[in-house]
Image (cartoon, coloured by chain):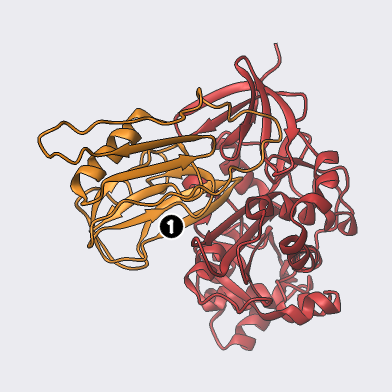
Amino acid sequence: MTTLAQQIFRRLGDGEFASGQALAAEFGVTRSAIWKAVHVLADAGVPVEAVSNRGYRVSGVAPLDGAGILARLPADARERITRCEVAWSLPSTNAALLAAREPPAGEAHVLLAEQQTAGRGRRGRQWVAPLGGAVCLSIAWTFPELPRDLAALSLVVGVCALRAFPACGVTGLALKWPNDLVAGGRKLGGILIEMRAESAGPVAVVIGIGVNVALGAQARAQVAAAGNAAIDVAELGGAVDRNGLAAGLIGEIVTALPGFAAQGLAPFAAEWRNADALRGLPVSVTRDAAVEIGIARGIDAAGALLVETPAGLRRFVAGEVSVRAQR
Amino acid sequence: MDIRKVKKLIELLEESGIAEIEIREGEESVRISRAHAPTVAHPVHVATVAASAPQTAPAAPTAAPAAAAPARKANEYVVTAPMVGTFYAAPSPGAKPFVDIGDEVKVGQVLCIIEAMKMMNQIESDKAGRITSVMAQNGEPVEFGQPLYTIE
């Protein structure tokens, strides 16, 4: 992805038409260079319109704006964020923050990317996000000491993410254990938390969130080819406002982290249970090669998934859960 | 407790200079001691191995921190699990393990991943040296403090 494509993406983000000639003059390049850059964007999934005599425009995809996101946060969350960057294209925002120095305890570093080329899911799975069609962000946070309930952070972040959606006009979402955001059985967003924890001392975590905002045909086909069902904010009738959604997600999470360290899952458990997408359904739990089946029975106080199996009630702290077809 | 793990512990004990080792995992514990006379085969006492404790109890509290006193030679270092979860030796199913017996590792090198509730914890080596044993099975649950690797 060239810098020119990036500049044009930002330039066209206001939704107004700009002619190839005007853009060429503005950026000091030929019209053919503009044409090529527009094609680079279109190939990456950006909905660029080209209309003769009027020029190009990108509608509904405002570029991510770090300062604008910060300005929309509640003051107590904003004060904790000591770094907030928007990258153009990264392999993975989680990987970038994991490789960087962790923030001091009590501070958050936030990284967003317009495009992730190697977005990651659990156990090496791929996360597909078209340029401008998703929110991909990561938050780095350091707990001064091991929270008593660290693993439950996963569920707590799911609850926080859920809280951010009504403001964007999306309601009725559910959580698939531990923290997938789903609507009608299709995945709207995913969360992957990675960390480097040791037995003693501070715990540096990186919370990664990907939310489908307006996927476009190309990304949909890619997700479907992998055997997954995706849904996006646009299809749910929500506002296609990535900056607003990003601000909501960051605000909810950063505000909740200190409370989680002190109180664990308990203050969030009722909200999680109300949003449980699996309760009562036949499920299978896969851990690499091992598969177990049963009926999902909610979560325990530590956030582990309870499944009633032929061998009795089992408790899972890890694994990929899928809903089995009902006979 | 997995019989392979007990076997590993016996090997560990044999290699080391110590006389006895006790490992507790949740409700199970095993104590292995060596006879003082070097000509006698090493007897194994399995103490209070609770009948395959149901890990399935609803709302079971996260297993109590296990005080695993690792047996070690003077130059041997035991990497233990910092959290309860599922142990993965490789970054993704079917991939090559991060490390194997005989590999040289550096400080900060990723040895394995422990997953709990989709939180992926990269366990890094806090010691440079050679991996002399891998004591956890891929995809198996591990408890807090459980020995994972020995590094020499």
Q: Tell which chain the image draws in red.
A: A
Looking at the rendered structure, the secondary structure element under dot 1 is strand
Q: Residue furthest left?
A: B39
A318 up-or-down from A190: above or below: above
Q: Residue at x 21, y 50 (%)?
A: B16
Q: Amino acid at mark 1?
A: Ile
Q: Residue under label 1, please give it.
A: B123
Q: Tell which chain the image draws in orange.
A: B
Depth check: A243 or B62 in front? B62
Residue A232: give x, y in percent of width and height: 74, 48
Quadrant of the drawing holding the C terminus of chain A? top right
Mark 1, Cα crowd under 10 Å, few <14 / some 14-19 / many 20+, is many
Q: Residue A134 occupies which quadrant of the picture?
A: bottom right
* Residue A233 in sight here: no
Residue B127: give x, y in percent of width and height: 32, 66
Q: Is residue A7 left or right of residue B113?
A: right
Of all chains, the one bearing label 1 is B
Depth check: B90 or A230 in front? B90
Q: Residue at x 39, y 48 (%)?
A: B147
Depth check: B26 or B97 in front? B26
Q: Is residue B61 left or right of residue A4?
A: right
